[in-house]
Image (spheres, helix red, strand yellow):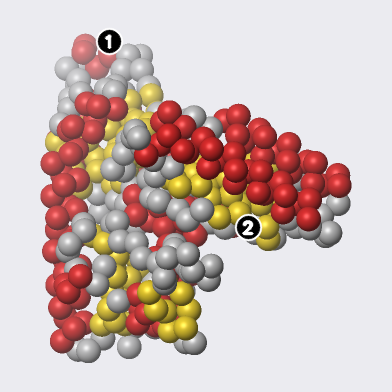
Amino acid sequence: MQPELTPAVLASLRRPRHYPAVSVLVPTHRRKPDNAQDPIRLRNLLADAAKKLEADAAVTPERRQDIVEQLDLALAEIDLDHAEDGLAIFASPGEHHVWSLPRTVPERVVLADTYLTRNLVAAYTAEQPYWVLAVSADRAALWRGDARRLVEQHTAGFPLTRSLDDPDAERKERIGDIPSTYRDERTRQFFRQVDTALGEALAPTARLYVAGEQAAVTLLNEVGTATEHAVPVPHGGLANAGAEAVREAVRPAVTAQEQQSVAATMADIERARGWKELAAGVDEVWEHVAAGRVRVLVVEEHFRTTVRQDGDHLVPAEPGDLDAHDDIVDEIVERALEMGAEVRFVPDGTLPEGTGIVGIMRY
């Protein structure tokens, strides 16, 4: 299983490398008969990468051999039987990375001093990840979820556990002072540890759900601050549960919050339209994003379009146009994030007039 695609991983992948950093993007398919050509396309693109390395006078034979070996190692890791919609393969001296993506990518081989990461950035943003803290008096587990899966996290000490055995229980029983589990000071100390670990693991803006008995959820809010903006899911028995049980328990809350988010986004768009602070369509949005004028970029989840640059504008590309940009949406998403804009994805067909993409202006 590939590692989790997190902001820290993205930042690591985007840092400059010694030339050449090779990026190979391969469109793939989930089902027959479309996936029959995937192995051939993959090998052809890797062979094309080797040819580009051979033809580049700036690449020494030693470095060329190193990168070709890295590409071979990457190929050995790929399982096309479980392909999604695209592959991103990165290789440079001494390292290689393979990412399977739930978004289509253009067929491309690029040699540069950085990896071509915009498709990964867009895929990560479109996933709209969320986190679940499943907590009980003796265990706290942290999960990361998205539309595809829910995976338990092993970071910042998670999962945290403790024993419920109380070495002072006999004395407390003798004097009649046995507090309930969630009033016990040892439990409060454990929950303070959970709060501290959660603060280390997640950004304050992370979309978080806290699943546990109501008393546990209440105590977490009492002893710390890491869950003050979390959505409570009063459901016990999940701290030791598997992924499917946790996912089903939080699904209604996740769905409700997503619906509220879409409704709020549409209200923001209508307000921006009224104030004439709305850009719509690829060409107009690209211009404003490039100038840093977009505050919120809104994109339909599967919106894709192929364009070419005509002067200062983007226009629809003809089939076979060698200057076409067939991942322009991912490029706009990455540029918007670089410019400090917020990026929101909404279901297909949500945006007005079939634009697929709109921008809410800063001014």
User: Position of 57 compared to 355: left or right?
Assistant: right
Crowd band around label 2 with a 10 angstrom C-alpha radius: few (<14), some (14–19), many (20+) = some
Per the image, the residue denoted by label 1 is 170
Task: Name the disc covering residue 110, or none.
Answer: 2
User: Position of 305 compared to 337: left or right?
Assistant: left
Residue 103 visible in this rendered orientation of the protein:
yes
Q: Quadrant of residue 241?
A: top left
User: Position of 144 compared to 61: left or right?
Assistant: left
Mark positioned earlier in the residue sequence (2 or 1): 2
75 to 131, vertically: above or below: above
- Quadrant that contains the C terminus: bottom left
Residue 181: percent from left, percent from top: 21, 25
Q: Secondary structure at mark 2?
A: strand
Residue 4 visible in this rendered orientation of the protein:
no
Residue kind at label 1, given as amino acid type: Glu
Q: Which numbered mark, 2 or 1, is in the foreground of this view?
A: 2
Crowd band around label 1 with a 10 angstrom C-alpha radius: few (<14), some (14–19), many (20+) = few
